[in-house]
Image (spheres, coloured by chain):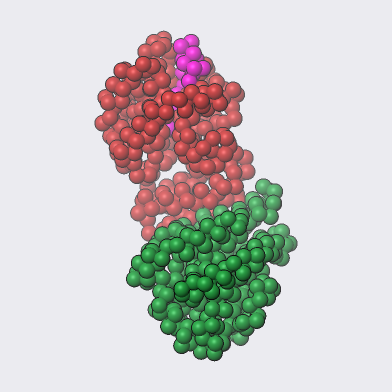
Chain colours: A green, B red
């Protein structure tokens, strides 16, 4: 997705939010804000929002000398999600269409963001998503919830590349991966994480905490970007990308950096900003299972 | 009021809104956005938001070679307000406390902004403000609607300096000025406008369109700033400022540039941003009659 004009003020807002999360002084925040502002005229107009996000968070890491500012938030998100894992797993097993329920929960998990998140927020989002069956059928017709095509792809695919997004959220992803394996025991799954600490995005250690290594091969994509920019990824990742029959991409950052693409991608995300909503032709907070064709 | 960190993304948003209003191309907008971004590290941290606003709109005027980008919007706002002048005037005359009604209407007029504004918006805002009598009394106790002290000041003041804000809004101001003259026929009123075109702020020509010259002496403050920064105003304006017993200041720009002040100022405004709401300790969209003490 291109970087729209409205993304630039949002970059400043994201910088301020990160500075506040780190309890920096107003002067320290302003120094970072100044550097981010100076970046704006330098940015290649073809750069996607996650690429610019990576530059901003590089500034924050350099200015604060904190290599992983969101480490504690990620740990907390993982713990919170692990606590409800059995509960969620039970919901999937007992449902009429376990794969559908697992897909919905995986999208609901995308609500976990670096902001304040509580058990209540997650429970509310899950309840909202599990209850709106009719709405999702309407969306399927509008191609914003392509569940049936995904189901068929999962049944026949030999390989699946699953692009993870946030810490915490990946515990929800694990439930979907388990259900995919139940549907297609022969499928070879790669689970991709970021190459280095960037916002609250999942790293290898988070994927291991989630237990994903028991069900998929974890690969870091070699890039410290809150999305997936193929050109900037490692060679091993590029090889897996090229050889995957089916790709599931979680979250807005992966969407923004990949879309439009010629690959067989199913994007799962909650729409978290107006710019993306407008680009996709949907509404803020919509839950999306969008098939790139 | 100081410029808070959150004001910086807002400056970019304001620039984008101005560019879109002028139907500039995306490239033209980005060029302006780049220049505004470069300004951020250069700004004196003690500058108030209107001072920074003046620099931004200078960039827009220079880049577009349009000296008064909001001319048509100002003309439209004046026409819209003039159409309902008699209706508003009647409301004031027929009310139990004409001065109070005129004060409320003058604040309601502050809803007129450079965005899309319709008769409906104005009517809605007026109805809302005229109906919430109880709420205003509560606010008076909290010093956010100091009507009784203002009434007393008006009755005894020899001179009044009234700082105008937007075009269109000044027709509402005229009704208040007329009512002030009714209450205190001896009062000498100066009505201040900006020194040059800045956003949709009223200029001398707008004040004349409103007919304010029939009731007050119009003075331009000599500065092209969407607020009132005394140091940057002309000597004649400074003299009037110093000699005024009572000052009424309309709108957020005047508040942001004057507050805190040692002068006897009554600020009338609708709170249009979260940063100001937090600074004042009130809510977004609140209507305020705040006495600087």
Image quarter (top left, top right, bottom left or bottom right) of the C terminus of chain A: bottom left
Q: In x, y percent, where is residue B6? A: 57, 47
Q: Is residue B151 magenta?
A: yes
Query: B145 or B173: which is nearer to us?
Result: B145
Q: Is residue B278 visible?
A: yes
Q: Quadrant of residue B69?
A: top left
Q: How many marks?
A: 0
Please name the residue shown 36% across and 27% down the image. Answer: B172
Q: Is residue B31 left or right of residue B127?
A: right
Q: In x, y percent, where is residue A23? A: 69, 51
Q: Is residue B252 magenta?
A: no
Q: In x, y percent, where is residue B11? A: 51, 48
Image vertical order of residue A272 relative to residue A143, above or below: above
Q: In x, y percent, where is residue B207? A: 35, 28
Query: A31 or A87: which is nearer to us?
Result: A87
User: In the image, which residues are magenta?
Assistant: B147-165
Query: A117 or B60: which is nearer to us?
Result: A117
Please name the residue shown 51% across and 17% down the image. Answer: B149
Q: Is residue A115 visible?
A: no
Image vertical order of residue B265 relative to residue A145, above or below: above
Image vertical order of residue A72 relative to residue B4, above or below: below
Please name the residue shown 58% across and 55% down the image. Answer: A120
Please name the residue shown 35% across and 31% down the image. Answer: B127
Q: Of all residues shown, which one is farthest toward the right?
A: A65
């Amino acid at each position: 997705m291109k970087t729209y004009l409205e993304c630039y003020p949002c970059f400043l807002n994201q910088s301020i939010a990160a500075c506040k999360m780190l309890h920096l002084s107003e002067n320290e925040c302003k120094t970072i804000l100044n550097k981010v502002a100076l970046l704006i005229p330098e940015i290649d107009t073809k750069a996607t929002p996650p690429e610019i996000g990576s530059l901003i968070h590089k500034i924050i890491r350099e200015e604060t000398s904190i290599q992983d500012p969101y480490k504690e938030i990620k740990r907390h998100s993982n713990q919170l999600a692990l606590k409800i894992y059995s509960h969620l797993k039970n919901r999937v097993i007992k449902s009429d269409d376990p794969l559908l329920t697992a897909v919905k929960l995986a999208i609901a998990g995308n609500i976990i963001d670096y902001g304040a998140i509580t058990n209540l927020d997650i429970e509310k989002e899950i309840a909202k998503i599990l209850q709106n069956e009719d709405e999702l059928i309407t969306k399927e017709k509008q191609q914003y919830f392509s569940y049936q095509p995904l189901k068929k792809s999962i049944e026949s695919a030999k390989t699946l590349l699953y692009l993870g997004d946030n810490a915490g959220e990946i515990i929800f992803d694990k439930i979907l991966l388990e259900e995919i394996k139940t549907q297609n025991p022969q499928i070879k799954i790669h689970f991709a994480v970021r190459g280095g600490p960037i916002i609250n995005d999942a790293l290898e250690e988070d994927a291991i905490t989630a237990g994903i290594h028991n069900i998929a091969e974890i690969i870091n994509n070699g890039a410290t970007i809150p999305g997936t920019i193929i050109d900037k990824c490692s060679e091993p990742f590029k090889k897996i990308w090229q050889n995957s029959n089916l790709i599931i991409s979680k979250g807005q950052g992966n969407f923004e950096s990949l879309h439009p693409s010629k690959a067989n991608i199913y994007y799962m995300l909650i729409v978290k900003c107006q710019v993306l909503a407008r680009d996709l032709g949907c509404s803020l907070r919509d839950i999306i299972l969008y098939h790139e064709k």
